[in-house]
Amino acid sequence: MDKEMLEADPFQLDDFLPYKLVKTAAHVADSLAHIYEREFGLSRAQWRILASLGAREGIKAKELAEETSLDKVRVSRTLVEMEQKGWVSKERDAKDQRAAFLHLTDKGKQLYVEILPKARAWEKGLMSGIEWQEYQSFLKTLDALLEKAGGDPRRTIREP
Amino acid sequence: MDKEMLEADPFQLDDFLPYKLVKTAAHVADSLAHIYEREFGLSRAQWRILASLGAREGIKAKELAEETSLDKVRVSRTLVEMEQKGWVSKERDAKDQRAAFLHLTDKGKQLYVEILPKARAWEKGLMSGIEWQEYQSFLKTLDALLEKAGGDPRRTIREP
DNA sequence: TATTGTTATACTCTATAACTATA
DNA sequence: TATAGTTATAGAGTATAACAATA
């Protein structure tokens, strides 16, 4: 065993990119979750679907799954919850009876326009103190990393 | 319902920072996981503990939990697994019989020096194409976001 | 009384497969 | 045969609480 090799260039988990990235992402996600979970009682899946549907009325479950990085099983179940809460309605596609166009109900839209500004204000607060240029560079690097890491586009993710 | 408000400034989940951040982090984490999971058969918790212990021999379970963002229950259980595999040994602290100093066995160190270079090479590959200055700025922004999001330092996280 | 670490348990999330009804 | 969506189930991860031993 080469002891030198163990000590020469000490590995710090905290400085290791994926760890740092995931850790930061988890804390940022938690911070946002305060709004939609504690303040509005939405689950993470419900939040993502609300946010997605609010901006893209009338899409189908399959597209919704792609947009939100949730798998079709979770989308299906979350939609049932959201229908029961009266936030979402389905409109069968006459051309394809298997699928349905999804809509926010008035109640759902009301929730959307209530949460969205808060989420945006939160995002703004998070960004305050970060230069616009630095932020643009940050986004660019994120895109590059996602591109590099690539991987399975069907990969589902938990946080918002 | 103000339809204008819904369409005026469309919200794109994909451009929303926490979503983008978590999504990128998940894919980057998956990419690394190929190495320690598929190539070496380590779980994520095992990988983090190995990486941590390799660099900081002799720490105790409590410090290990803090370093790895794993809770003490998971650390305790993962250490049992790793002892059984012969990678980790415990040395009771004579000054505090409740705790133990943790060590990698020779077998554990061997695994460490085998995985580490691969992880670093993977990281280097991920970074190739990204300017050094851009990367420094990226790390700085991550730190700023973590600082801002702050939150519970005991927060446990799943990915590497 | 408080702390370190272990054990137990319930809950959620995830992955997979099987199923239906359509196409 | 293939696809959209649903249902079922097993496994992994997470959060909590209770506990033993020691401080």
Image (tube, coloured by chain):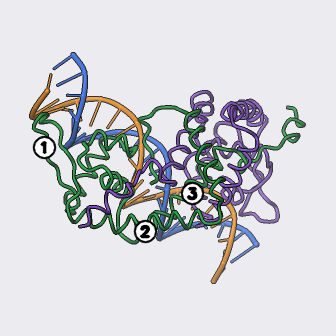
Chain colours: A purple, B green, C blue, D orange
Q: Chain of mark 3?
A: A
Q: Give the residue type that dot 1 points to.
A: Arg
Residue A49 can be seen, yes or no: yes
Along the line of sight, which residue is nearer the eye, B135 or B25? B135
Q: Which residue is mark 2?
A: B118
Q: Are marks 3 and 1 on the same chain?
A: no
- Do discs 2 and 3 belong to a common subunit? no
Q: What residue do we see at 71% from left, 54% from top?
A: A140
Element on which disc 2 rests? helix
Whether residues under marks 2 and 1 lie with C-beta atoms below 8 angstroms apart, the answer is no
Q: Secondary structure at mark 1?
A: strand
Judging from the image, mark 1 belongs to the subunit labelled B
Q: For the residues marked 3 and 1, what is the alpha-carbon distance in whole angstroms? A: 42 Å
Q: For the residues marked 2 and 3, what is the alpha-carbon distance in whole angstroms? A: 26 Å
Q: Residues within 10 Å of mark 3 (few under 14, many from 20)?
A: some
Residue tagged by mark 3? A156
Q: Alpha-carbon neighbours of circle 1 within 10 Å: few (<14), some, or many (≥20)? A: some
Q: Who comes first in sequence, dot 2 or dot 1? A: 1
Q: Compared with residue C19, is residue B138 higher up or lower down, i.e. above or below?
A: above
The residue nearer to you, when weighing A122 against B91, is B91
Mark nearest the camera among 3 and 1 is 1
Q: Give the x, y percent position of residue C3.
A: 24, 28
Quadrant for residue B3, please give it: top right
Residue drawn at point x = 50 percent, y = 67 percent: B122
The residue depicted at 31 percent of the width and 40 percent of the height is B63
Q: Which mark is residue B92?
A: 1
| x and y, in percent, of residue D17 in the image | 30, 29
Are discs 3 and 1 less than 8 Å apart at CB?
Answer: no
| Amino acid under disc 3 | Thr
Can residue A76 be seen from the camera position used here?
no
Residue type at tag 2: Lys
| Quadrant (top left, top right, bottom left, bottom right) of the N terminus of chain A | bottom left
